[in-house]
Image (spheres, rainbow, N blue to C red):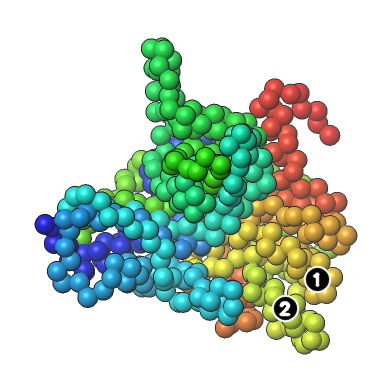
């Protein structure tokens, strides 16, 4: 029998969640570096450069890769010969205490994003607990643990379908990927769970993306098998087929169009009822965060940090030659209307921030005829919920959140508050694009997965409205050369439509005619 101390599991969980807040898995970084070298789309290559630079900065500074420090999730396998002689807590409680310590670490506080009473009061638990824990009792005398922090953007794009046994699974996946848009922050990894029951398929998909990025090894195995006249398993065949076909869709980094949408595809399956084919799809984003450790009774886990020299030699800097500097303090509607799709812009001056909760409160106040706490006239709003600052920071990592969540508020903001432009992550939906077009506005996109890098452009930050909302409060940021791209212009043209369409055609070898 192996005795595991309660404190050893708690501390190992705390260390793991701190670790994954600022360290990408090295296999992901190496795969992303290779994708950077291959990428031919200038917009996608620039986005990948920002992600790689941000990753190294986060590793050096021990600060979060992404402002969305995720919901804690743990896969734990407990050997049947393990005992817990000093434990006063359940395993769930031990894990929650580890998460609590990790998220409240004063040297690197993480953003609390977990809400209790999700369909009611939606009250922040303030410490990111409870974690979502999946337990398994297995033979043996060790405890095996996978810790992951899953951001809301990628989780929101999870898909499930109960297909008929005769339906084509590949067709379903290829239909779903474009529908997911870019809110899951590609390039990343997609996991496919097949079989079991609905909840089992989802669990398989989620578990699959915790495995190493090794599609290159599978390609080599396939070549060796073909030479010997052998076959791969169906799951292996699906990985290769989906990897090629998903990338051929041309979605590209951040949905801007390009050669790499996924760095790997993972597939796990399980026997299922003869009448059904449950299929789940769960993505891992550009802020892929997970680590594995085991406990053998000798003390807390020792999680070895990666070497900084193993990061690709890619350093993003503002493109002062091709980018347009914009002064937010003197910005006019006419200037906004002149921006072109895909135009690179460096923002300078003061902007406001706001996410879902702030927009909902603004809507309620306007409906009641109440005065707003800030004047949005000729201002720009940034969709962000930053991490709290430490030491000499003015703000913690502050990357954009998925903009489509604010679509239903866009017309109200443009027509009732005087707002003239917005900044967020990924695409806008038809409701927002129509409002942007009607009001001769524009939507700017910042790179998801580059939160620490983006935060370096913020020179001052203060809360100016709805302070009780915490990270969802309205801030005023003073920024210097903050990099953004015009994603939707005043005519309603979206680069998230035109970019993937162009690169899908290029990949297919179809001649692309310039408009």
Q: Which disc is residue 21 wearing?
A: none
The residue beneath circle 1 is: 412
The residue drawn where x is 78% and y is 70% is 413
Q: Is residue 250 above or below residue 4?
A: above
- Tell me residue 82's x, y (percent): 17, 58
Q: Is residue 124 above or below residue 339?
A: below
Look at the numbered disc 2 and give the secondary structure of its residue: helix
Seen from the viewer's position, the closer of residues 275 and 219 is 275
Seen from the viewer's position, the closer of residues 478 and 71 is 71
The residue beneath circle 2 is: 362
Mark toward the start of the polypeptide (2 vs 1): 2
Point out the image quarter for the N terminus.
Answer: bottom left
Seen from the viewer's position, the closer of residues 456 and 122 is 122
Q: Residue furthest left?
A: 1
Residue 379 seen in the figure: yes
In the figure, is residue 24 to the left or right of 48? left
Disc 1: CA contacts within 10 A as few (<14), some (14-19) or many (>=20): some
The residue drawn where x is 81% and y is 86% is 369
- Tell me residue 329's x, y (percent): 73, 68
Disc 2: CA contacts within 10 A as few (<14), some (14-19) or many (>=20): many
Look at the numbered disc 1 and give the secondary structure of its residue: helix
Residue 247 seen in the figure: no
Point out the image quarter for the C terminus.
Answer: top right
Seen from the viewer's position, the closer of residues 340 and 231 is 231
- Tell me residue 393's x, y (percent): 46, 69
The residue drawn where x is 60% and y is 42% is 163
């Amino acid at each position: 029998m192996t005795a595991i101390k309660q404190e050893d599991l708690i501390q190992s969980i705390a260390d793991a969640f701190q670790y994954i807040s600022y360290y990408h898995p090295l296999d992901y970084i190496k795969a992303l570096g290779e994708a950077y070298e291959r990428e031919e789309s200038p917009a996608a290559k620039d986005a990948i450069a920002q992600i790689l630079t941000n990753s190294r900065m986060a590793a050096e500074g021990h600060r979060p890769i992404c402002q969305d420090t995720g919901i804690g999730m743990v896969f734990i396998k407990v050997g049947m010969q393990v005992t817990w002689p000093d434990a006063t807590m359940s395993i769930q409680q031990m894990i929650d205490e580890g998460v609590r310590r990790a998220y409240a670490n004063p040297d690197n506080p993480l953003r609390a994003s977990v809400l209790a009473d999700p369909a009611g009061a939606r009250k922040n638990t303030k410490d990111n607990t409870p974690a979502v824990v999946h337990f398994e009792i297995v033979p043996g005398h060790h405890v095996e643990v996978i810790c992951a922090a899953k951001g809301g953007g990628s989780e929101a794009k999870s898909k499930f379908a109960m297909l008929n046994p005769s339906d084509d699974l590949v067709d379903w996946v290829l239909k779903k990927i474009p529908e997911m848009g870019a809110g899951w922050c590609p390039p990343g990894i997609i996991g496919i769970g097949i079989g079991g029951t609905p909840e089992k398929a989802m669990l398989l998909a989620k578990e699959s993306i915790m495995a190493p990025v090794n599609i290159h090894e599978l390609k080599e195995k396939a070549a060796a098998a073909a030479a010997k006249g052998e076959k791969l398993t169906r799951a292996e065949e699906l990985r290769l087929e989906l990897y090629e076909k998903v990338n051929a869709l041309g979605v590209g980094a951040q949905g801007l169009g390009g050669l790499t949408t996924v760095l790997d595809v993972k597939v796990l399956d399980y026997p299922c009822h003869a009448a059904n084919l449950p299929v789940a799809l769960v993505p891992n984003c550009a802020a892929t965060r997970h680590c594995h450790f085991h406990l053998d009774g000798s003390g807390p886990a020792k999680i070895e940090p990666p070497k900084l020299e193993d990061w690709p030699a890619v350093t993003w800097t503002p493109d002062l030659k091709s980018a347009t500097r914009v002064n937010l303090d003197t910005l006019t509607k006419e200037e906004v209307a002149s921006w072109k799709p895909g135009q690179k812009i460096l923002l300078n001056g003061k902007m406001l921030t706001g996410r879902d909760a702030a927009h909902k409160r603004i809507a309620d106040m306007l409906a009641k005829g109440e005065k707003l706490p800030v004047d949005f006239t000729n201002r720009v709003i940034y969709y962000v919920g930053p991490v709290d600052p430490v030491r000499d920071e003015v703000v913690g990592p502050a990357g954009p959140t998925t903009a489509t969540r604010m679509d239903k508020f866009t017309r109200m903001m443009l027509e009732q508050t005087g707002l003239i432009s917005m900044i967020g992550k990924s695409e806008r939906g038809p409701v927002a694009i129509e409002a942007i077009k009607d009001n001769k506005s524009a939507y700017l996109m910042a790179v998801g997965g580059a939160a620490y890098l983006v935060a370096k452009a913020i020179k001052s930050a203060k809360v100016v409205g709805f302070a009780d909302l915490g990270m969802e409060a309205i801030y005023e940021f003073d920024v210097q050369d903050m990099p953004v791209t015009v994603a939707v212009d005043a005519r309603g043209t979206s680069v998230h439509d035109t970019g993937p369409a162009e690169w899908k055609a290029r990949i297919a070898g179809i001649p692309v005619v310039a408009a």
